[in-house]
Image: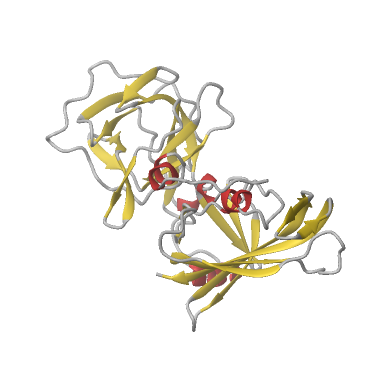
Amino acid sequence: MKKLLTVLLFIAIIGAFAACSPQTSTPGAQISEPKTAALSAGEAFKLGDETYALEKWAALPEYDTDTQIGIGVCFVQKEGVAPIVISGGGYKSLIDMTLNMDGAPLSTSNISFIKAEDAPGYAGRVTFEFVLQKGAALPVGGTIFHTGKNERIAIDLSALEALPIEAEPKTGSSESTAPAPDDFGKQAFFGEWLLDSIVFRTPNEDNGIYAIDASMSISEGFEYGRDLSLREDMKMISFVDLSALIEAVPELPFTINDLDLKDYSGWTYSNGTITFTPGGPAFTASCDEASKELRLTRSGEAAIIPNTVNGMTTQSGTVLIDITMVFKIK
């Protein structure tokens, strides 16, 4: 029998990794000067209450244009804790970074926090995202800082494996500057959304194993998260955890592990399908502009766990289940 889980809000916010809102802050005069000996790749260091190590450069093609290119500086973190605070109804990172570009600091365009499953000994990965002009040399140094702990640390980037950067920006008019067809479609999904209801449905109600056709209304205080932000730069922020909800409700005798949206930091759109990245599920997506309603439907097979709830008995087997999240625009 499943037990109802109690998930505290601060655990949902702090314990999960998700993309943060764009950061444009630079270290102010009140923050102490960085250490004189710059830290290099693989060297563990403490910033705030967490332990980090410089990892690698990352290409960020979502920022690329004819004249600029997106790059990321990745750090791995031992604790798996996103150092963020609630600010102005959103979320703000407590750590930030600047790059040394021709004597002037370059600020981040965004900061993302995700789980690290490919870095032994580390639980999370922080990527500081920057936009460079094409043809610019990768910087050899930068500064990472913590706004809440009054700390700055100089970072040596010279030992990292360089990324291929186009030598010169493209000039003149391109042969075709019209957006791709999918660019028009995805624009309808940009914005801040709030989970309003969840619909569970088995398309084949006569499967003889398990059938459901039910809607769950979501109200303020829902402990499994309601917010979903789909940004124009194809980053996403969400604290919705349907995997935990399904685990907690006895009337849902199955487990789906990829519906904790806190695990994802980006999204793609193609031919009516939104896919969360990295490695996330695909949803049939529709947006009603008149009612300002977004519907994301995940269709897939689920293994039913034999159970008896409220006199209803389920059989063991696999059935197709549609799960639709209905969001309203904020």
Q: Residue 207 appears in which quarter of the rendering?
A: bottom right
> In this rendering, would 313 be left or right of 275?
right
Which residue is found at the position 47% from the left and 71% from the top?
328
Which residue is found at the position 24% from the left and 45% from the top?
25
Front-most of residues 8 and 191: 8
Q: Residue 99 appears in which quarter of the rendering?
A: top left
Front-most of residues 124 and 16: 16
Q: Residue 314 appears in which quarter of the rendering?
A: bottom right
- Where's residue 218, x and y in %? 50, 66
Q: How many marks?
A: 0
Which residue is found at the position 34% from the left and 19% from the top?
39
Outermost front residue: 311
Outermost left residue: 29
Residue 168 seen in the figure = no
- Where's residue 281, x and y in %? 64, 53
Front-most of residues 239 and 6: 6
